[in-house]
Amino acid sequence: MKKTFLFGTPVVLAVILFSCQKLFWDIDHGIKPARGALLSANGPGNTYELIDSVLGGNAEEVPDCSHPDFGRHISEIWDSTLRRYVFVFTIHVTPDNDRCVAFDRQRNEIKTYGPSPDSLKGFLNDTVTHMWKFKLDSGFQPSPSFCHIHQIKAGDGDDGAPLITLTPRFGSPDKMQIIHTGSSSSTSLGTVLQVALAPFRGTWVKVEEHIIYKTAGSYSIKISRLRDDSVLLSYSNTNIDMWRNGTTFIRPKWGIYRSLNNTSYLRDENVRFNDFYILKGTY
């Protein structure tokens, strides 16, 4: 029995490693994995309809109502680096706002939410994996106020502040931050990690995020540069508040959500995203 166990363990590990590598390869090449949902750009036109067909409902939160002359603020273009179509999330300092509801901020995001399939939501005790790619412009400019490009947020109940944000922040130097907000001040960790923003500018990166949704939950994120797999950011915590009082589910959001409190720091931005992957359970 002992010899069988010792022989079998490397084989099992090799199978797991192969499975992970195949998953990454499939997503990198725009191939939908056998499990989970994958949203990838497929060419100009019907962009919102494509997003909705995967995420469900009307999954965009866009500033189109305040800027109808521009048209849709999420589009698809050919990317010469990836040699594929990708999504472009566009935000203008003026006149864009937050859906003609809030005017001290502006939002251009996609999300899962109530009408989304249950397979794309995080329920209590669920294990969830998110993967995606993004590229900040080489001149991307954050401000001292909030500027989130990814959120993990409660879908109902105590759904004000997000649990997790990925936040570019103005500073000396500019930073990329991971910020955590728990159900109370005693369980909120604040900025858990910050690294220089410069390595993120002008290059495609891929993100791998793992979450166990519960009060004493788990969260990890790794961001690697696509061209050489260099790790630009890595954080893991196996005892972190990843649930919210009164909520029934938690969901991801991607895009640009930024404050207008310091507009002198901001400029019009185009952030590229692609290959949003959501999997419940382990792979």
Image (cartoon, rainbow, N blue to C red):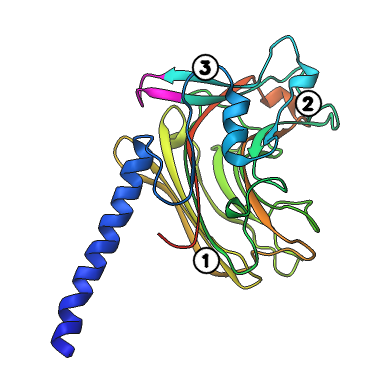
Q: Please tell me whether mark 1 sits on a helix, a strand or a loop.
A: strand
Q: Is residue 73 magenta?
A: no
Does 178 sit left or right of 274 as displayed?
right
User: What residue would you read off at disc 1?
Assistant: 237
Give percent across and percent down for residue 140: 55, 26
Which disc is residue 155 wearing? none
Would you name the residue on which mark 2 appears? 97
Q: Position of residue 271 (x, y in %)?
A: 55, 27
Tell me if mark 3 has few (under 14), some (14-19) or many (20+) residues whose alpha carbon lies within 10 angstroms of its own.
few
Depth check: 80 or 227 in front?
Answer: 80
What's the distance in space between the residues labelled 2 and 3, CA to CA?
A: 24 Å
Residue beneath the point at 66% across and 34% down? 109
The reply to whether dot 3 and dot 1 touch (C-beta < 8 Å) is no
Name the secondary structure under disc 3.
loop
Q: Residue at x 75, y 64 (%)?
A: 183
> Comparing marks 2 and 3, which lies closer to the viewer?
3
Q: Could you say which is closer to the camera, residue 51 or residue 130?
A: 51
Name the side, left or right, on which 200 lies relative to 72.
left
Q: Which residues are magenta?
A: 79-85
Q: Is residue 82 magenta?
A: yes
Q: Quadrant of residue 192?
A: bottom right
- Residue 174 figure quarter: top right
The kind of residue on which mark 3 rests is Pro
Give the quadrant of the N terminus.
bottom left
Of circles 3 and 1, the one toward us is: 3
Measuring from the top left, give residue 76's x and y in whole percent: 52, 21
Residue ranking furthest to the bottom: 1
Q: Is residue 73 left or right of residue 21?
A: right
Three-letter amino acid code of the residue under disc 1: Asn
Task: Check disc 3 and report the residue beneath it.
Answer: 44
Q: CA distance from mark 3 to mark 1?
A: 40 Å
Does label 2 or label 1 sit earlier along the sequence? 2
